[in-house]
Image (cartoon, rainbow, N blue to C red):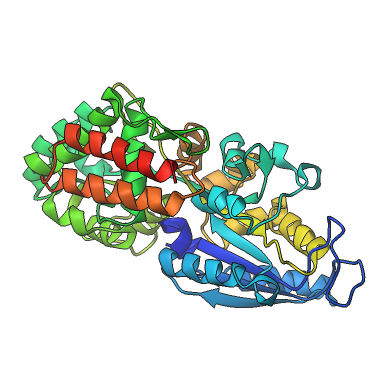
Amino acid sequence: MRWIRAAGRGLLVLVVVLTGYVASGARAEDGTVGGRGPLTIATAGDLTGYLGPLLQDWNRTHPAEQVTLVELPDSADETRAQMITDLRGGSRGRFDVLNIDVAWTSEFAAAGWIRPLPRDRFPLGTFLPPVVDTATYDGRLYAVPYVTNAGLLLYRKDVLAKEGVPPPRTWAELERAARTVAPKYGLDGYAGQFLPYEGLTVNAAEAVYSAGGTILGDEGERVTVNSDAAREGIDFLARGVREGWIPQQALTYKEEESKQAFLDGRLLFLRNWPYAYAAASAVGSPLAGKVGAVPLPGPDGPGTSVLGGSNLAVSSHARHPDTAARLIAYLTSEPVQRQVLTRGALPPVRAALYEDPALVRDFPYLPTLRAGVLAAAPRPKSPRYDQVSLVVQAVVHDATTGRQTPEGAVRRLARELAAISSR
């Protein structure tokens, strides 16, 4: 996902490796109660290079708590694997604070790898409300939101203007323009991220949610996917491929491939994260001035995006918890969140920044993104999220490639997710 790849590419994983955290009274390795000391912070694919300067600012004012930056692999799966390997290492582990995909919070909390955090240490009331829910598990706060994201529908506003067609608000409007307008201009109709990886889980969940359905409930203990709404959502994607207004090539797209197809002038519509809009609108882009962005459509009006982004969590074996908590507070403060946007091109979690006139002038998609985040929903919460995601990817891929009907796909999803929940 984009946030990892650029906060990463539709998904950044930042691991803050702190050599200390004792806000809850834990003891340092020398036996003293303290909680402050030098830190190591690791991030997956800091592609814009924004994090180094932010940490330099911290280091200038915290000489006894220096932060060293370490980068993990660019791939979300590889980053998660390295994190888990480290966390399972107990006190020998290097990682003290982790910037985890929002979908991993429940898994890491249920496994006992990260500690609960005191809510009163962080200004959660100043954040966009939906992002806080991604940081909780079983009613407790286990992380602090750091970067958020919501999917947007990018479109060729120059093409739609020539045809006198407004940007779509519903699936029917999207489908009609993808079938009738796109071919006139030598374009494919619509694409998202349909390769079987985490991006397909996100796209599938958005389709199900937009139709009014859900996948799991009760922190993953109840399977709710067997519904007409879920069938409608999966059918929307499968029908698009079958009828050709979603091109076959889209079944190989991740974030970057789909963004490049749009930049190359091959698509009329694209579902992607805001970074793709920024890239398409940038000076020097072949599409500069020709791109618009609106909330994702649904069956009867605006649909529901899946929340992307990352949360900062503290390892259960962190050695300096007080420094960890203060570093998290620093990275989520309003001045730093402003730089996360302006230097890193990553959507901040602070609500006030989305209404700042200067920022809206420089990042005109902010109001649309804010609306998308406020209407967004988290990916299915589960302590076995990795297994849940793999099942969703496999089943929906079979539906989009015609190996299984949407009805059969929903029944199979219900059966396989129930088996995961019962373990």
Q: Is residue 222 above or below residue 107?
A: above
Q: How many marks?
A: 0
Looking at the image, which residue is at 20% across and 27% down?
Answer: 172
Q: Is residue 143 left or right of residue 377?
A: right
Horizontally, is 147 left or right of 172 in the view?
right
Q: Is 289 or 137 nearer to us in this picture?
A: 137
Residue depicted at x 40% and y 56% = 1
> Residue 398: percent from the left, percent from the top?
18, 48
Whether residue 347 can be seen here: no
Q: Residue furthest right?
A: 32
- To which quarter of the image does residue 32 belong? bottom right
Q: Is residue 365 visible?
A: yes
From this view, report whether residue 100 is shown above or below residue 297: below
Q: Give x and y (percent) for residue 107.
A: 53, 51
Measured as percent of width and height from the top left, residue 200 is found at 30, 50
Q: Residue at x 26, y 23 (%)?
A: 228
Task: Give left or right: position of 42 versus 162.
Answer: right
Looking at the image, residue 305 sits to the left or right of residue 207; the answer is right
Task: Write down the quadrant of residue 29 in the picture.
Answer: bottom right
Query: Residue extending furthest top?
Result: 300
The residue at the point 34 percent across, 47 percent down is 201
Q: Where is 101 relative to 174, above or below?
A: below
Along the viewing direction, whichever of 230 and 250 lies nearer the viewer: 230
Q: Give the percent coordinates (x, y) of residue 119.
A: 76, 43
